[in-house]
Image (spheres, helix red, strand yellow):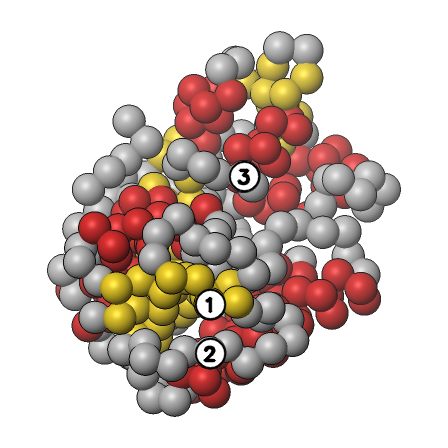
Amino acid sequence: MRLAVTGASGFCGAAVARLAAAAGHEVVCVGRRPGPVGEHVQWDAACELPDLAGADAVVHLAAAVGDPPPGRHAEAAFRAVNVDGTARLLAAARGRPVVWVSSASVYQPGPYAGPVREDHPTEGQRGAYGRTKAAGERLALAAGSVVLRPRAVYGAGDRHLVPRLRRVVRGGYAWLPGADVTMSLTAVENLAEACLSALAWPAGAYNIADAVTYRRDAVLSRVLGVPVRHVPVRLVRGLSAIVPSVTRYAVDQLTEGLVLDLTRADAQGYRPRLSLA
C-alpha cells in the first residue's frame, strides 16, 4: 500500500518507515524533515493540516516528547502537537485506517498491584507529555483508530531514553531512587512490527512491549556500564520540588515498576521477537 508515516525522521518513526519499505510498501514520510526512505511531504504538526493525498493508511508517530519542567509554556507547546496536531491528522485522514502511537505514560501513576491492562485509568499524569498524549489518544480512539501504548522504547538511534538515564551516573555509579523493581521495555523493532501489523487490528488501545520483563537495576547497570547504588525515594522526591532536572515523572518511571499486560495484542498475533539481550 501507499503508507503515510508521520514523524519518520524521529527514532521510532524512522524504524517504522524502514520496515514498511522493506515489506514492499510505498512510504510517504510526513513531517518537518525527510525520513530515511521514500517520499517526503512537509508537515508541521503544531500548526498545519497534513497532505495525505494518495495515502491508503497512516501510522502516526509525530509527537512532542520529553520531560520539560512544569509550566504553561511547556503545556501549550506539547498540546499544540500531541492534541491539536492529532485533530488535524485525523481530519486529513478522512476515514483511512490510522495507527496512532501513544505511550504507557498515559496511565495513571502507580503503585500498581500487577500488570497494567488497557482499562487502567488514563488520568492524573504528572507531566505535559503524559497529559497531552492521553488527550490526543482520546481523540484517536473516538475516531476509530488503533492506539498502541509502548513503554520505554529503546534501540539504536535513541536520542531520548538513554541520554536521560545517563544523568543518574555520578562518580562511577548509577544512583537510583528506591529498591529494584520489575518493568516493561520495548525494542524499537518490536514497536515497528506492531505498527504495521496493527493496520489490520480492530480499533482500540493495545499495550506493546517486549515479551519478557526486566529488573531495573540489572538493565541500567548493563546499559550504563556502571554498578547501581540506591538513594531513598523520599529524598529524590524532595529534590524534584527544587531541582528542575529531577521531575516527579522521571522518579515515577524509575520507581513504580510498570509492567504491561500484553493479552490484547497477543490475541491479534503480536509476537515480539527481540529483547534487550
Q: Residue furthest right?
A: 242
Q: Residues within 10 Å of mark 3 (few under 14, many from 20)?
A: few
Could one spot residue 276 in this view of the protein? yes
Q: Residues within 10 Å of mark 1 (few under 14, many from 20)?
A: some
> Is label 3 in contact with label 2 (beta carbons under 8 Å)?
no
In front: 248, or 231?
Answer: 248
Quarter of the figure with the N terminus: bottom left
> Is label 1 in contact with label 3 (beta carbons under 8 Å)?
no
Disc nearer the start of the sequence (2/1) = 1
Q: Residue furthest front?
A: 39
Q: Residue furthest top?
A: 172
216 w.r.t. 114: above or below: above
What residue lies at 25% left-to-right and 55% top-to-bottom? Answer: 21
The kind of secondary structure element at disc 1 is strand
Disc nearer the start of the sequence (1/3) = 1
Task: Give residue 51's mark.
Answer: 2
Q: Which residue is mark 3?
A: 159
Q: Which residue is mark 1?
A: 41
In front: 272, or 88?
Answer: 88
Whole-percent x and y of residue 270? 19, 56
Whole-percent x and y of residue 85? 57, 75
The kind of secondary structure element at disc 3 is loop
The Cα–Cα distance between marks 2 and 1, rounded to whole angstroms, is: 7 Å
Callout 2 amino acid: Asp
> Is label 2 in contact with label 1 (beta carbons under 8 Å)?
yes
Whole-percent x and y of residue 39? 38, 62
Whole-percent x and y of residue 60? 42, 67
171 w.r.t. 125: above or below: above
